Image: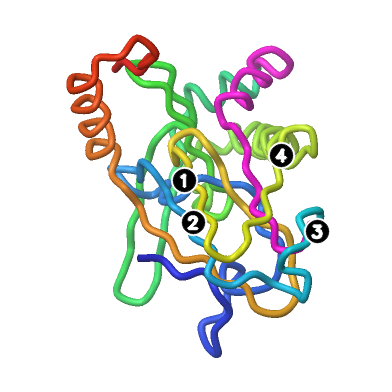
Amino acid sequence: ILHNRLSDYNIGILDSQDPLHPHTDASYLFDMCGLQCFNCVAQSGSDNDVEDSTEGCTKLVDGFKIMELLKLNEPETYNFFLNTNLKWFCKEEGVHMEMVEKAFSESPYKIFRYNNYDLDTVDYLPFDFIPEYYKHTKVINDYMRAEDNVVLARLNVGEMVIVDNQRVCHGRTGFTGFRNMVGCYVGRDDWYSKLRVLKDRFAVAWFKFSI
């Protein structure tokens, strides 16, 4: 169970009122999280029921759409993230996780993995490659943060959103007051298994899911 809220200690960007840029979670894991659930238990500000407020909104970005846009408009950047292994890490007291993996995968499964906050120092890349790294990370960040590519969803208390963490990036707008999101991860194997079971059980024509 994950809590995203302000606390009296260990204040970082996650546990702050600052905006959070769109990203996928746990890019540093071998078995990257599948589904991610966000349940709103406290919303910021005094206008909790004002639907057009942009304070404390959840940002959602379709990573597959970003891949398509880069492939069309920025082919060098697309190929960089498709073919370059990057190092992702998480280091806290008693924990040091890291994963070396490409940001984009087209086969055997299409996967989008990108978290600017999880990127490690680039001492593992050849020196001549580092300017390319910074050029392409700027491009992908610009695309992921462009207003046209971001959907804002302001959850009220009791509302939940579930996203595919290997496709959909999430973030938030800045806020005042108190905001608390409680969530959890569901492994990709678990929910793929459930989908297969449901498909076999009901065998309905509209069920288009296939893996």
User: Label 3's element?
Assistant: loop
Q: Residue at label 3?
A: 53
Q: Distance between the residues labelled 4 and 1?
A: 16 Å
Q: What crowding class fits label 3: few (fewer than 14 Cα within 10 Å), some (14-19), or many (20 or more)?
A: some
Judging by the rendered image, the residue that carries numbered circle 1 is 162
Residue designated by label 2? 38
Residue farthest to the top, as pictured: 205
Height in image: 43 above or below 139?
below
- For the residues labelled 3 and 4, the Cα–Cα distance comes to 16 Å
The answer to the question of whether label 1 and label 2 lie on touching residues, with beta carbons closer than 8 A, is yes
Residue range in magenta is 54-75
Name the image quarter holding residue 102: top left
Q: Does the magenta stretch include residue 74?
A: yes
When asked about the image quadrant of residue 8, the answer is bottom right
Q: In which quarter of the image is residue 77?
A: top right
Pick the residue in front: 143 or 59. Answer: 59
N-terminal label among 4 and 2:
2
